[in-house]
Image (cartoon, rainbow, N blue to C red):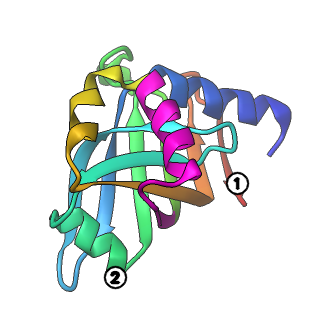
C-alpha cells in the first residue's frame, strides 16, 4: 500500500469504535458487532467469552471478514460513507503472556468501556492479522491491498 492509502485506513480505523466480525461456522456464518482496537500494522484485536459461538468458529475456521464504516457520520442517501472490509486470519492471544498484557493495553486505550470484561477468567482475545483489504472512501477514493 502507498503511504496515502495507509493513512486513510489508519484514520478510518481510529475513527470507528465497533466493527462487524464475521466468522464461519460449520453451516452458517455468524456476524457480531464488536468493539475492537487496531495495531499500527492494522492487526485488529477483539475480545470474546470462552464458549461463545464466534470464538468456537474462530478456533475451527480462523479466516474472518471484518467490516466497518462511518454510516452514522456519512450521507446515507448519496452513499457518502467511508467503509473498510478486512479479510484475515485470527490467532488467539495467550492469557498471562507479555503479548496479552501489551494487546490489552492497546485494546483498553481505544475501548476503555470494555475494562470490566477483563476481570473474567473466561475472557479471550483474538488478533486478526489482515491478508487483504478493500477500502472505499466517502470521497469516492477506493483501493484494494494484499498483505
Could you say where residue 61 lies in the image, as x and y percent from the top left? 37, 79
Given residues 50 and 25, the one toward you in this image is 50
Could you say where residue 87 lies in the image, as x and y percent from the top left? 51, 60
Which residue is situated farthest in the front direction here?
96
Q: Secondary structure at mark 1?
A: strand
Whether residue 93 sits left or right of residue 123 in the image: it is right
The residue carrying pointer 1 sits among few (fewer than 14), some (14 to 19) or many (20 or more) residues within 10 Å by Cα, namely: some
Q: Earlier in the sequence, mark 1 or mark 2?
A: 2
Residue plotted at (15% across, 67% down): 51
Residue plotted at (40% across, 32% down): 69
The circle drawn on residue 60 is 2
- Which residues, given as a range, are shown in magenta? 89-109
* Residue corresponding to mark 1: 145
Q: Give the number of marks.
A: 2
Q: Secondary structure at mark 2?
A: helix
Q: Is residue 80 visible?
A: no
Q: Is residue 67 visible?
A: yes
Residue plotted at (50% across, 31% down): 105
Amino acid at each position: 500500500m502507498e503511504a496515502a492509502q495507509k493513512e486513510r485506513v489508519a484514520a478510518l480505523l481510529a475513527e470507528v469504535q465497533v466493527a462487524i466480525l464475521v466468522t464461519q461456522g460449520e453451516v452458517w456464518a455468524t456476524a457480531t458487532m464488536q468493539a475492537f482496537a487496531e495495531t499500527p500494522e492494522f492487526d485488529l484485536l477483539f475480545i470474546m467469552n470462552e464458549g461463545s459461538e464466534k470464538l468456537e468458529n474462530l478456533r475451527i475456521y480462523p479466516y474472518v471478514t471484518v467490516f466497518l464504516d462511518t454510516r452514522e457520520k456519512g450521507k446515507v442517501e448519496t452513499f457518502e460513507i467511508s467503509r473498510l472490509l478486512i479479510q484475515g486470519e485470527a490467532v488467539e492471544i495467550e492469557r498471562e503472556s507479555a503479548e496479552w498484557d501489551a494487546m490489552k493495553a492497546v485494546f483498553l486505550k481505544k475501548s476503555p468501556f470494555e475494562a470490566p470484561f477483563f476481570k473474567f477468567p473466561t475472557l479471550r482475545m483474538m488478533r486478526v492479522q489482515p491478508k487483504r483489504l478493500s477500502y472505499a472512501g466517502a470521497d469516492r477514493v477506493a483501493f484494494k491491498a494484499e498483505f
